[in-house]
Every structure is written in C-alpha cells, then in structure tokens.
C-alpha cells in the first residue's frame, strides 16, 4: 500500500487527501494518509474546491452489486497473483503518478553539493533546526537542497538518484527504526554506482521524536563535516546552553513532584481500585490483567494496578496464559467498550468454553469514555435520561444489555455492585477470589461516567439558578481538628481534590488533609474512610443556593447558637 506523510502545510495536506484517492485508483492499491500530532496543530488557510457528487453514495444507490471477479479476492491462490501484480504493475503505476503529479517536493539551495531527504511530516522541525544553524530563514528558504517525501512509500528510484547524484553527501531525516527509507535509498544508490555519502541514523537517534533540538544535534555534526564555520558554532552554543539548563534543573535539591495522569474527579472507576487495594490486603496480591481504557490509569500512583495490557478487550484472554501458573485466581479488568469490542468473544466465550476459573471485572460506565464518551450498545437510552427523577444520579442500570448477554452465554456467577459502595465492592472482590465456585466469576462495577453526568448536570443547575430555583450541591470536607495527618485517605483514593495543607494547630507539624474546590460530591473519601476504618475526619455538607425563607431563618438561628457556644 502507499503511505502519504504530507508536509505540515494546510494547502499541501488538503491536496494530499485528494491525490491520495487518485493515487489509490491509479495504482489499484490502498493509500494511508499519516497525520502527525504536530501537523494536526498547524494553523493557516487553504483554497477550498467545490464538492464533487459521488457516482455511488447513500443517496445514489447501486442498482446491482459489482460483477464477480475471483481474481480480486484476498486469499490463496489469488494472493500469489496479487504479489506479482504489485511488483509488475501497481508499484510502477504509483511511482509514475508520483512523478507526474509532483507529489514529492524539491527545494533548491546554494550548497548544491549537499542535500537532505526528509519525511514530509518532519519538514517544519527540520526548517526550524536549519534556522538554528543559519542555513534557512523564517520563510522556509533553505541553503541546503531538500527532497521532501510527501509520499514515503513507494519511493521513486529515479527521483532519489537524480537528487543524490553529484553531491558530496546526503542526509536522510527519518523518524523511527529500523530505518526503512535510509536502507532503501542506500540500496538504490549502490545499484546505480552513485558514490554519494549517505548519513542518517549515524547522526540521529534511532528512536524517539525528532524535535528541533534533536535534529539540530544531528544537523550540527553534518554541517561540521561538510560546512565548517560560525553557523555550527552558534548551534553548538545553543545546544550546550540547553544541556546546562537541564543539568541545573536536575541538580535542584527540591525538584518538582511528578504529575502522573489520573482519573477524572469523581470518576466511578477510582472507588473500585480503592476496594481492590483493600481486598488484596486481606487475600494477598493477585495477578491483574489490565486493559485499554480509562481504567488503565490505575497503573499509575497510588494504585499500581495491572501487570499487563495486551489489547482492547483482551485482558481476560491474556490472563489465560498466566492463570495455570498462579496459586491464586487472576483478575481481568475491562470496560464496557472493551467488552463489546473484543472481550465478549475472545475472553468470556473462551473462558466459559474452557471452564476457566477466573475473575472478570467489567466497568459499566455506559460509554467508551477514554476516547470521548462515544455511545455503545449498553449506553443508557435518551428516554431514560429524560425520564430520570433525579438528573444527578447514575442511570447506567437502566440498560441491562451486558447482564443479559452474559446470562445468555451461560455465566452462572455474576454480581452487580455500584462502584461508590466501596465496602460492598471490597466484600464482592474478596468473595470472588475465595468462593468455592469453580468457573468464571463476573463482577459488574456499575457507575456512570462522571464526564457524561456533569455534562448533563451542569447545564441543568445553571438553568435552575438562572430561574431562581433552589439548588442543593453536596460537598465533602475534612475536619482539621480530627485529621491525624496520616494521609492514608490520599494514598487510598488519589482524588485530585483531596490534598494537603499546613496544619492550623501550631503544636502539630504534619500537614492535614483538605478537600479543595472542584469536588463533585461523589463521596469516595468518606466511603474509603469507612471501609478501611480510617480516622473519622470527613464530613458531608450540603451547599444550598437560592434557599427558601425558612432555610435562611433556620441558618441564622443556628449561627447564633454556634456563636453563643463558642468560647470567648
């Protein structure tokens, strides 16, 4: 197949989309357009074209299916014919189109005895690096000729050879390894007996992103060998200054604390890992097969939960290779998105068929949350959201598709637990690991994605406040006089709003825990304190906005009583 890696310029990028389709039709091969993260953040403008009405679409349906052609199928022995067509017809046709339409770009420069061949997506970083050496200006005009590969596969041998012939040296700027492009170019040059020196990974790192600084290091060595002068000295001073700053930062006695990614505030998955942490204190450590999704954030502090991540929905299948070697039962974790994507067939069906004795924990938050809360088959219906008496409560229990599917497959041991019930979740996990039942045990951790809940709750609250309606918001806090400064609550939950502050008691040194603004009132801190028997310092408060007249009166009376009871 063809791979397009366009130069990060909106005109070039949009053109490559159109040319990619045409290249695919011309070569009879699929084309992939690679958009790097930096390319996706480019700003600018481009001239749009009128849309072309497709011959076939959902509005212009095909009257009859395509004619049957056995040679277009994708299985042996047809694939043998495809391999021959690829080398005899398809790649040559692609190369011809690349040259005729000038998909790859050539930029001339005054140092014609040198050259740089670069992947299109790295062009901007390369130009910025050349600027550090004084070999390019702010408008992209370069002193060293460039061959920009907007199509990185297939390469056009004649195009590469014409660019390299007669040059003292050419540098290939290619991210990743193995260096496929550099190796192919080296082969092309040797077969044509072109003796141009070729550089690439001998000057640049084998792996990692080619940032401006990384490229500047390689280009400085390249220029020093072939263009010695003040430009390289300027670049070396810039690189040395950067190295000094890093060394100075590393030498600080109090470096900035690490900030690993974590769950959202109020995420319904955090309580489960708190419960799992407590359960393992009783039954011992267990092997945990993690999965792709929000729950993979539990591999960071403070949970450190997950020994492997194989693929989306593959946790239950992957633990099958570990279970026979473990004394205790293993735990597989997956989200409802992963369950529908892969876990149902490769995991649950296989475990039931083979009679595996394992524990599966399914996070039922109602959405494919990690990629943007896309709807799935187990997402609560719009009618359920509209008919909910309390709009702030989780409504994922209204959709029982996962439970019905598991029952239909023959799962005999299944428990559904609300995620914020930490003590109940801990007991259920302990039961699953110690139960005499021999077979697949499924725990469904039920709790709606907090992001989706807040997207539903916040507009509703704003509307009520605007109308002058009474609104009650729950917030949790810490009694500073009761907190003993142990901070076990923080280590057990990792909630971003649960942090520390200086102890108000001058006789105590240890800082106390505190709940900062941003708390969504999920109640995890209090539930953890109860389940783990921590210090009883948490309290639950109701913040009333637009209170009624009798609530204002009662609040005034309570305040007067409290002030009267306070010591002078």
Image: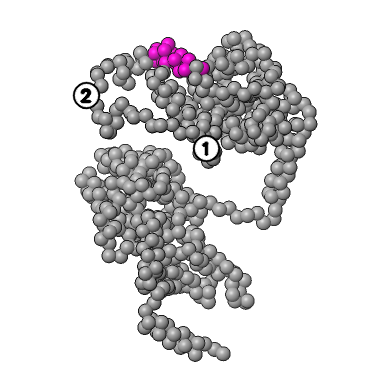
Judged from the image, the secondary structure of the residue bearing numbered disc 1 is: loop
Q: Nearer the viewer, residue 472 or 346?
A: 472
Graded by Cα atoms within 10 Å as few (under 14), some (14 to 19) or many (20 or more), the crowding at tag 1 reads few
The location of residue 120, given as percent across then percent down, is 55, 29
Q: In percent of the image, x 44 and y 27: which residue is there?
A: 18
Residue found 31% across the figure and 46% down from its top: 376
The residue that label 1 is drawn on is 45
Please tell me which of labels 2 and 1 falls first in the chain.
1
Left or right, 193 with reference to 416: right
Residue lying farthest to the right in this orientation: 230
Q: Where, quadrant-wise, is the C terminus in this rendering?
A: bottom right
Disc 2 target residue:
64
Magenta-highlighted residues? 83-99
Decide: is 92 above or below 351.
above
- Give the image location of residue 91, x and y in percent: 45, 16
Give the Cα separation between the discs numbered 2 and 1: 42 Å
Query: Quadrant of the image for the N terminus?
Result: top left
């Amino acid at each position: 197949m063809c791979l397009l890696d366009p130069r990060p310029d909106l005109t070039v990028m949009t053109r490559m989309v159109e040319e990619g389709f045409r290249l695919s039709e011309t070569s009879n091969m699929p084309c992939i357009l690679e958009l790097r993260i930096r390319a996706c953040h480019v700003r600018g403008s481009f001239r749009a074209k009128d849309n072309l009405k497709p011959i076939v679409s959902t509005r212009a349906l095909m009257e009859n299916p395509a004619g049957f052609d056995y040679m277009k199928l994708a299985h042996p022995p047809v694939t043998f014919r495809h391999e021959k067509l690829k080398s005899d017809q398809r790649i040559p046709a692609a190369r011809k189109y690349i040259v005729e339409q000038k998909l790859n770009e050539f930029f001339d420069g005054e140092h014609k005895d040198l050259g740089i061949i670069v992947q299109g997506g790295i062009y901007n970083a390369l130009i910025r690096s050349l600027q550090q050496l004084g070999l390019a200006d702010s408008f992209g005009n370069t002193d060293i000729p460039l061959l920009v590969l907007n199509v990185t596969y297939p390469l056009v041998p004649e195009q590469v050879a014409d660019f390299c012939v007669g040059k003292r040296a050419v540098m290939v700027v290619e991210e990743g390894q193995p260096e496929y492009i550099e190796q192919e170019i080296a082969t092309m040059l040797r077969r044509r007996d072109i003796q141009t020196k070729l550089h690439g990974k001998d000057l640049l790192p084998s792996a990692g992103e080619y940032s401006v600084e990384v490229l500047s290091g390689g280009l400085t060595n390249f220029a020093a060998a072939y263009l010695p002068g003040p430009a390289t000295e300027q670049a070396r001073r810039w690189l040395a200054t950067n190295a000094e700053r890093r060394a100075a930062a590393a030498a600080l006695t109090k470096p900035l604390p690490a900030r690993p990614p974590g769950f959202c505030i109020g995420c319904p998955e955090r309580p489960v890992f708190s419960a799992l942490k407590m359960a393992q204190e009783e039954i011992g450590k267990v092997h945990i097969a993690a999965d792709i999704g929000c729950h993979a954030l539990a591999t960071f502090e403070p949970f450190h939960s997950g020994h492997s991540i194989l693929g989306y929905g593959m946790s239950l299948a992957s633990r099958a290779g570990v279970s026979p070697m473990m004394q205790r039962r293993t735990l597989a974790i997956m989200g409802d998105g992963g369950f529908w994507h892969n876990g149902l067939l490769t995991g649950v069906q296989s475990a039931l068929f083979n009679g595996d004795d394992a524990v599966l924990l399914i996070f039922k938050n109602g959405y494919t949350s990690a990629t943007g809360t896309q709807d799935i088959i187990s997402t609560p219906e719009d009618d359920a959201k509209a008919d909910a008496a309390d709009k702030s409560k989780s409504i994922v229990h209204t959709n029982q598709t996962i439970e019905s599917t598991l029952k239909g497959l023959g799962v005999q041991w299944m428990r559904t637990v609300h995620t914020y019930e930490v003590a109940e979740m801990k007991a259920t996990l302990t039961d699953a690991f110690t139960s005499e039942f021999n077979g697949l045990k499924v725990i469904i951790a039920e709790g709606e994605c907090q992001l989706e809940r807040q997207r539903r709750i916040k507009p509703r609250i704003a509307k009520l406040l605007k109308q002058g309606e009474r609104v009650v918001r729950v917030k949790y806090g810490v009694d500073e006089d009761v907190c003993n400064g142990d901070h076990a609550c923080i280590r057990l939950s990792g909630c971003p709003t649960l942090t520390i502050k200086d102890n108000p008691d001058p006789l105590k040194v240890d800082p106390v825990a505190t709940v900062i603004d941003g708390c969504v009132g999920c109640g995890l801190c209090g539930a953890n304190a109860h389940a783990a028997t921590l210090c009883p310092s948490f309290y639950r408060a109701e913040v009333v906005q637009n209170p009624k007249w009798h609530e204002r009166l009662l609040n005034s009376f309570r305040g007067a009583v409290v002030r009267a009871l306070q010591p002078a």
